[in-house]
Amino acid sequence: MNVVAGAPSLEHLRLRPAGRADLPTLVALRRAVGWGSGGLEGSLGAAAAGRQAIVLADLDGIPVGAVTVALHAGLPPGRAHVSDLLVSPLWRRRGVGTALLQAAEEEARGRGLRECTLDVDAGNAAALELYRRAGYVHYRPAQFPWGPGYTLRKVLGPAPPAARFGLLGRLHWRLR
């Protein structure tokens, strides 16, 4: 893991559910990694309806990454699909992506789902390595409009007792 002098340590990394008020932050994060902002309003609506979760990561109030995990709608029973895992370029290879991926998996486990899938571009070596280290394996090839890729999957272990409500559910209960 690379460390930059003067950068906040990851002990200050805060993960929280994203809501509609976070739309400008999510747009800025997507632009920082070269993505467009299309579909974000729909994703936030699906999150508000409980069909997916969006987790936002910040370090000392600075947004550094986000991940979306689909929990229902069109997925096979028992499966979640992780998408839009993004980390601001200045914060890559420091554990932010790993923390976000773990939060997505915890949310899936907390909802009783036992498998996660995700898609990755074939040429994205850094993401492929992150997912390999996290236990994801090749499931099938994928073809995106911009080029070839893979769908990876991971069988999730049973949820620990503390994960009974998932990350976002526990945050909700803690805030009540």
Image (cartoon, helix red, strand yellow):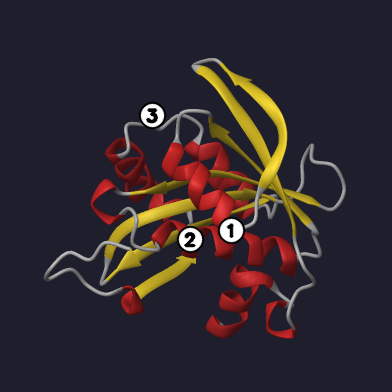
CA neighbours of label 2 inside 10 A, class few (<14), some (14 to 19), many (20+): some
Q: Secondary structure at mark 3?
A: loop
Q: Nearer the viewer, mark 2 or mark 1?
A: 1
What percent of the width, then of the height, locates residue 72?
76, 47
Q: Secondary structure at mark 2?
A: helix
Q: Between residues 16 and 104, which one lies in front from this camera angle?
A: 104
- C-beta proximity under 8 Å, tags 2 and 1: yes
Q: Is residue 17 visible?
A: no
CA neighbours of label 3 inside 10 A, class few (<14), some (14 to 19), many (20+): few
Residue at 33 percent across and 73 percent down: it is 10
Q: Quadrant of residue 56?
A: bottom left
What percent of the width, then of the height, locates residue 35?
37, 31
Residue at 22 percent across and 72 percent down: it is 8
Report the side of 17 relative to 58 (left or right): right
Report the side of 110 relative to 61 (left or right): right
Q: Is residue 108 visible?
A: yes
Q: Nearer the viewer, mark 1 or mark 3?
A: 1
**How far, Cα to Cα, is label 3 from label 2?**
23 Å
What percent of the width, then of the height, locates residue 22?
39, 53
Report which residue position mark 1 lands on.
134
What amino acid is found at the position of numbered circle 3 in the picture?
Answer: Gly
Q: Secondary structure at mark 1?
A: loop
**How far, Cα to Cα, is label 2 from label 1?**
8 Å
**Image position of 124 with respect to 131: above or below:** above
Q: Quadrant of residue 171?
A: bottom right
**How far, Cα to Cα, is label 1 from label 3?**
27 Å
Report which residue position mark 3 lands on.
36
Report which residue position mark 2 lands on.
98
